[in-house]
Amino acid sequence: MTAPTRPFAEVIGDPIAQSKSPAIHGHWLERLGLEADYGRAHVRPADLPAYLAARRAQPLWRGCNVTMPHKQAIIPLLDGLDPLAARIGAVNTVAVKEDGRLIGYNTDAPGFIEPLLPVLGDELAPENALVIGAGGAARAIVVALADAGLAITLAARDSDKAQALLDELAPGARHRAAALGDFVRGGDGEFGMIVNASPLGMVGNPPLALDLSHGRPAAIVYDIVTAPLETPLLAAARAEGMRCIDGLTMLIGQAGIAFEHFYGADPARERGDVALRAILTA
């Protein structure tokens, strides 16, 4: 890249061309009139140490968002971790402190829980959740839901992997692991929330085979997939009259927290992020 002339941050990953982060942060920078930039950098796993070494030498670099496959690999290359990131064991935001230290954060967990906060205290608040997936995104989601007091059933192709994740992040009898295949056929309306924390249903991946009868009639169905935004899971849930939350909601929420780390400014999100969502779905 050419030598930067003003403060900048970026998102890194492999691949990275599909990332919506530049559009999100660029919208807020323009809206606030900040003299700063946000871009993307394609960083392969073998190049991650060299990338960080090069960025440390650039005084205008403010940090980066971290996507797959670097969320765990980057941890030993940093100078410290925020307690939440340390607990989750994954970093999606690296911020440069005034003394030059690189500190890792996880903004996925608060970004995920943000749209649920208004309903967690009402009479329709879910008491339990079926979470699908046992990868990096599921780690943040399990911690967020456990901290919110929900009982979690974590379903994955490999139930042993799901159990190991629960043992690490949310130990206790309230939570259990299960095989994903257990939820392909009809259920008994057990769950107040269903969360897809896997890539199933994403473009280029198989669909998520799930019978929605495992959810209650007023269940919240939350799919973190962003391409397509209206996944088959969400379309089916809407047809059943369930409450739906799409992947842009979490993506924007976690980005807002990262924006404050990078630029020291509140992104001044308007209610519902209507203008930003219009840009991202155009």
Image (cartoon, grey):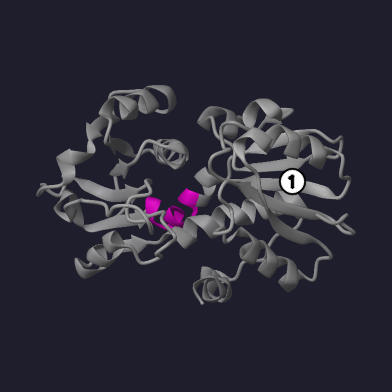
Q: Amino acid at mark 1?
A: Gly
Question: Residue 187: x and y, percent?
Answer: 11, 47
Q: Main secondary structure of the magenta part?
A: helix
Marker count (numbered): 1
Q: Is residue 30 above or below residue 16?
A: below
Question: Residue 141: x and y, percent?
Answer: 43, 42
Specify the quadrant that holds the N terminus.
Answer: bottom right
Q: Nearer the viewer, residue 118 or 253?
A: 253
Which span of residues is magenta-colored? 112-121
Does residue 109 appear left or right of residue 94 in this picture? left
Q: Is residue 266 above or below residue 92?
A: below
Residue 50: in sight, yes or no?
yes
Residue at 45 percent across and 36 percent down: it is 139
Does residue 113 appear left or right of residue 188 in this picture? right
* Residue named by callout 1: 63
Residue at 86 percent across and 44 percent down: it is 58
Does residue 37 appear left or right of residue 186 in this picture? right
Residue 188 among magenta residues: no
Choose top left, top right, bottom left or bottom right for residue 142: top left
Question: Residue 133: x and y, percent?
Answer: 34, 40
Question: Residue 205: x and y, percent?
Answer: 34, 52
- Local packing at callout 1 (Cα closer than 10 Å; few below 14, some 14-19, many 20+) is many
Does dot 1 land on a helix, a strand or a loop?
A: strand
Q: Is residue 215 above or below residue 182?
A: below
Residue at 65 percent across and 44 percent down: it is 43
